[in-house]
Image (cartoon, grey):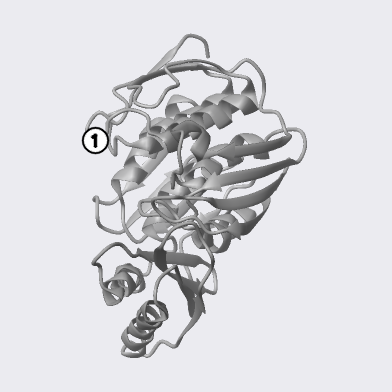
Amino acid sequence: MTGLLTIDGSYGEGGGQIVRTAVSLSAITGRSFRIHRIRAGRRDAGLRPQHLTAVRAVADVCAARMEGDAVGSRELIFEPTERPRAGEYVIDVQEAAGTGSAGSATLIFQALLPPLALASGPSHLTLRGGTHVRWSPPFHYLAEVYLPTLARGGFAVDVELHRWGWYPAGGGEIRAHIAPSDALTSLTLEERGRLVSVSGVSAASNLPDHIIERQAERVVARLRARHIKAEIALERPPAASAGTVLFLLARYEDAVAGFTGYGRVRYPAERVADDAVDPLDRYIGRRAAVDAHLADQLVVPLALAAGASTYTTSAVTRHLLTVAWLVPQFLPREITVEGAEGRPGRVTIAA
């Protein structure tokens, strides 16, 4: 493929997902691109610090030339000059923001993982920013749902949480070791089997203890009504700012799924718990293998694997439809999403 691929950054979900996915795939394929109308429909349109951090981090991996790599930019040109290089990388959202920032370290990690997994040697990452912030997967989802599922397809990654980072100050730190993946394999995730356990963590920093206790009590009571026993750990990690989260892990015989509620000012602890239990409740009732968030996060890794992959999801989302539109522009893979938005569906990545 030659020439500069042009991407409409306002398509579909129209957020940072398009930018992160595009730079990741560009690094892998060597295909240069221009993206315009970045986050055009958002109140704070253009690149924000966490998006810029992801762009620069992936650019470092493939020695990309760039234009428009600045906070607020609505257009970016990205031109890789080398294949992805293994190494030691330190990525800090604060450097792009110029101040404390809770930009998501987990989303930046997901942009870096595919190119580094295909590099010729192991890589070590240190990512600083938000580890548990709204609109992004918490570290626990990364460690207990996303990476264990990718491991079934040949990805070999270890992650550790060294510091928690909440909105607005950030200051969290994740460390990761990514081994080269010589033989990525396709996955079939259509049945999840019997429910084995539901566990989770109720955590808060710089807040009264009763908040995490109420979050956990709400979860236990709601799941008990479904005849499900839940084991919820209480954590009080030190952090630069106040924050609270409730994360639930549903472990089945053949699948894992995760669900998260984040606290915010004047938002009761019980509602934080409900924000995790409600999607778990829907997932249980729909009998799909993959939760709605994992469905879009699997598209890029599985599009890199040999052979056809297929999986069922509890809900088709705008994020899923957007990444299914974007990936074939970089890779010769046909991706089909069956099902209406908001309803259960099936994803097929043809061989």
Q: Is residue 286 left or right of residue 209?
A: left
Query: Is 220 placed left or right of 1 in the picture?
Result: left
How crowded is the residue under tag 1: few (<14 C-alpha within 10 Å), some, or many (20+)? few
The x and y percentages for residue 302 are: 54, 44
The residue at the point 45 percent across, 11 percent down is: 4
Seen from this angle, which residue lies furthest right? Answer: 121
Name the secondary structure under disc 1: loop
Q: Residue 252: x and y, percent?
A: 51, 74
Vertical side of 284 occupied by 81: above or below? above
Q: Residue lying farthest top?
A: 3
Q: Which residue is mark 1?
A: 42
The answer to whether one can see residue 157 in this image is yes
Q: Amino acid at mark 1?
A: Arg
Up-down: is 233 above or below 276? below
Residue 89 falls in which quadrant of the image? top right
Q: Residue at x 37, y 90 (%)?
A: 227
Figure quadrant of residue 337: top left
Q: Measured from the top left, where is residue 238 in percent x and y?
A: 54, 65
Figure check: 284 above or below 120: below
Q: Residue at x 39, y 27 (%)?
A: 71
Q: Nearer the viewer, residue 315 or 172?
A: 172
User: Is residue 197 at all visible to an observer of this figure?
Assistant: no
Give the vertical position of 194 relative to 19 (above or below).
Answer: below
Nearest the viewer among 324 and 138 is: 138
Residue at (53% x, 25% y) in the render: 26
23 to the left or right of 291 = right
Q: Position of residue 279 (x, y in %)?
A: 32, 67
Label total for image:
1
